[in-house]
Image (cartoon, grey):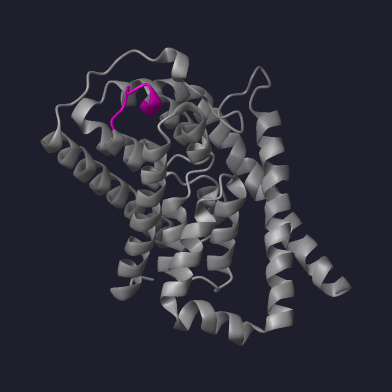
């Protein structure tokens, strides 16, 4: 047990400097482009799903949190909301970068999330447009809700938020790695791999549920489980598609139509798990 803990600590600490450098850059980028990105989406009109899918890939949950408020005020369409949620990467990119994951792997994940988010967004808007007239877009500044977990510095600059994020995510990585090592020790690597790899549908269904946890820990866990070889590419993609950071939490708070919220929740889960199964079926690794 002592050796397991020490190995987990060393693995987590080793990643911390890389995570910090990555977060410094991302915090700087968020300060420069945060409000600009929201403004672009607000004025995107029918091209909302395209722009939302591209901007949603920016790490951390700030943009997906803002999207909930924008949709509650009907500033963006339902399709744009879906495109943002499906493409949101949260902590996935920083972890892959710090783990020096292959560039082509990162590229495949990003492209899959953008294409799926954009495609689903346009499909939803098309179906809604055919069934009823589009509602007029109204100014809903009071409905905007921003995620305080990232992009907004609140006067603390770039280094302090980056340091906080590094500590938080390093802690999550430690917990996930230690839990996985303990599970492998108790259950056995072969049994765990057989559960998620041989019975593929179990991986996608489980990852999809895991991704819906409204916290950055879910994206950390899903990415780590893939890097450790527990999840297939399709299972990882399922979890990353359904995961939108605290975006869903904000949506449930500001949008008072609970039936609609539950429909969005179900739509994200079905889209994420089905796409993950399809990816595994065609053999994309």
Q: Residue at x 44, y 52 (%)?
A: 242
- Position of 82 relative to 210 (above/below): above
Which residue extends farthest bottom?
190
- Asked if residue 102 shows in the view, the reply is no
Q: Position of residue 119 (x, y in %)?
A: 23, 48
Res. 247 in view: yes
Q: Vertical placement of 223 versus 250: above or below?
A: below
Numbered-mark total: 0
Side of 267 relative to 157 (left or right): left
The magenta region covers 71-77
- Residue 178 location (% of width, % of height): 74, 66
In the image, taking residue 279 as reference, residue 47 lies left or right, namely: left
Looking at the image, which residue is at 34% across and 12% down? Answer: 139
Q: 197 and 13: which one is in front?
A: 197
Query: Which quarter of the rendered picture does the N terminus lie within?
Result: bottom right
Q: Position of residue 168 (x, y in %)?
A: 70, 44
- Determine if the magenta segment contains residue 73: yes
| Overall secondary structure of the magenta section | loop
Q: Nearer the viewer, residue 119 or 109?
A: 119
Name the image quarter holding the C terminus. bottom left
Residue at 28 percent across and 31 percent down: it is 77
Relative to the observer, which residue lies in front, 55 or 202? 202
Q: Is residue 224 magenta?
A: no
Residue appearing at x 33%, y 42% in the figure: 83
- State which quadrant residue 51 falls in: top left
- From the top left corner, tell me how far across and down residue 284 is, in percent: 34, 70
Residue at the left extreme of this rendering:
130
């Amino acid at each position: 047990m002592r050796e397991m803990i020490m190995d987990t600590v060393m693995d987590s600490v080793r990643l911390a400097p890389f995570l910090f450098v990555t977060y410094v850059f991302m915090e700087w980028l968020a300060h420069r482009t945060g409000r600009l990105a929201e403004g672009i989406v607000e004025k995107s009109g029918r091209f909302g799903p395209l722009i939302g899918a591209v901007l949603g890939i920016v790490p951390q949950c700030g943009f997906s949190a803002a999207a909930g408020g924008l949709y509650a005020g009907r500033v963006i369409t339902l399709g744009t909301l879906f495109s943002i949620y499906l493409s949101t990467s949260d902590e996935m990119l920083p972890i892959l970068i710090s783990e020096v994951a292959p560039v082509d792997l990162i590229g495949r994940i990003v492209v899959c999330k953008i294409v799926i988010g954009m495609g689903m967004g346009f499909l939803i808007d098309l179906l809604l447009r055919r069934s009823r007239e589009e509602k007029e877009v109204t100014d809903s500044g009071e409905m905007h809700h921003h995620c305080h977990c990232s992009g907004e510095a609140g006067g603390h600059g770039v280094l302090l938020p980056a340091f906080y994020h590094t500590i938080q995510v390093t802690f999550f990585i430690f917990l996930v790695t230690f839990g996985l090592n303990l599970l492998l020790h108790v259950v056995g690597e072969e049994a765990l791999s057989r559960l998620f790899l041989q019975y593929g549908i179990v991986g996608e269904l489980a990852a999809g549920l895991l991704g819906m946890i409204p916290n950055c820990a879910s994206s950390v866990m899903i990415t780590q489980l893939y890097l450790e070889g527990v999840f297939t590419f399709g299972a990882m993609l399922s979890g990353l598609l359904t995961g939108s950071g605290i975006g869903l939490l904000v949506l449930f708070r500001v949008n008072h139509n609970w039936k609609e919220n539950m429909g969005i929740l179900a739509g994200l889960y079905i889209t994420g798990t089905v796409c993950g199964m399809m990816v595994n079926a065609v053999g994309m690794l």
